[in-house]
Image (cartoon, rainbow, N blue to C red):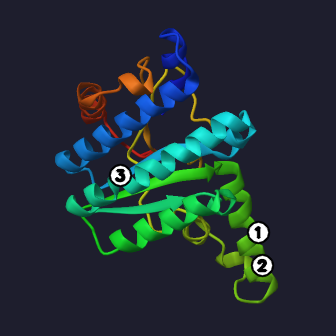
Amino acid sequence: MDGNGRWAKERGHERSAGHRAGAATVRDITTYARELGVRYLTLYAFSSENWGRPDREVAGLMDLLREYLVEERQTLLDNGIRLSTIGDVGKLPAPVRLLLDDVARATEHLDDMRLTLALSYGARDELVRATRALARRVDRGELSLDEIDEEAFAAALWTHDLPDPDLLIRTGGEQRISNFLIWQSAYAELYFTEQLWPDFDRRAFDAALEEYARRSRRFGR
């Protein structure tokens, strides 16, 4: 969800205004995805690299996340949306972690759509952690080297209970995946748009889905 800062700069606002506008887009696109019947939606909300941003900006993003969890809790419940997270969430401020746990528990029985927030997430970090977890199992004698295959590796990832993505959308004009779901996106269709995230509306989402529908997925075959 790229482009919040540039969106704000173009309008002469502080970056925080762009993040707030981006949060409004999150609300609308999540609800719309549910209406369309999308079963899984994963949002790259805060990367492991984002901790390097100015303290004021990071604090503002954490405040926005806390507001989102409070304000959207009932919306998730009303729409049958289960909330989950991937990433090193232990680094998040305690009040945010508590809210995340509360909303996750409140929605864990819902199965109309799964909304996953990637928070303090980095794909390389995820791969290293998975490798260490498998190595520890081998060291304890629970797993042999020959038993480490793609299925075993995928089971050690944060996304072990999620399907691989079909479509990866990036806004903001950049054409890279920036350390997001590297393993899982091996056969995902990639869609890049010049639109900045706060401007990514329902029509833009429709355009991405229509482009996806025109593609032929062969998975290397």
- Rounded to the nearest angstrom, the CA distance separating label 2 from label 1 is 6 Å
Badge 3 vs badge 1, beta-carbon distance below 8 Å:
no
Q: Position of residue 97 (x, y in %)?
A: 57, 63
- What number of labels is visible? 3
Of badges 2 and 3, the one in the foreground is 3
Q: For mark 3, give the secondary structure.
A: helix
Question: Pointer 3: what residue?
Answer: 71
Badge 2 vs badge 1, beta-carbon distance below 8 Å:
yes
- Residue drawn 29% across and 58% down? 76
Q: Is residue 191 visible?
A: no
Q: Is residue 181 left or right of residue 25?
A: right
Q: Where on the picture, by quarter, is residue 141?
A: bottom right
Q: Position of residue 12 (x, y in %)?
A: 52, 10
Q: For mark 2, give the secondary structure.
A: helix
Q: Position of residue 208 (x, y in %)?
A: 31, 30
Q: For mark 1, give the secondary structure.
A: helix
Q: Is residue 20 left or right of residue 112?
A: right
* Amino acid type assigned to the residue bearing label 2 in the image: Arg
Q: Residue 136 got which mark?
A: 2
* Amino acid type assigned to the residue bearing label 3 in the image: Glu
Of badges 3 and 1, the one in the foreground is 3
Q: Residue 132 got which mark?
A: 1
Q: Is residue 146 visible?
A: yes
Q: Is residue 167 left or right of residue 92?
A: left
Q: Position of residue 4 (x, y in %)?
A: 50, 26
Q: First in sequence, mark 2 or 3: give its number.
A: 3
* Amino acid type assigned to the residue bearing label 1 in the image: Arg
Q: Label 2 crowding class (10 Å Cα cut-off): few <14, some 14-19, many 20+? A: few
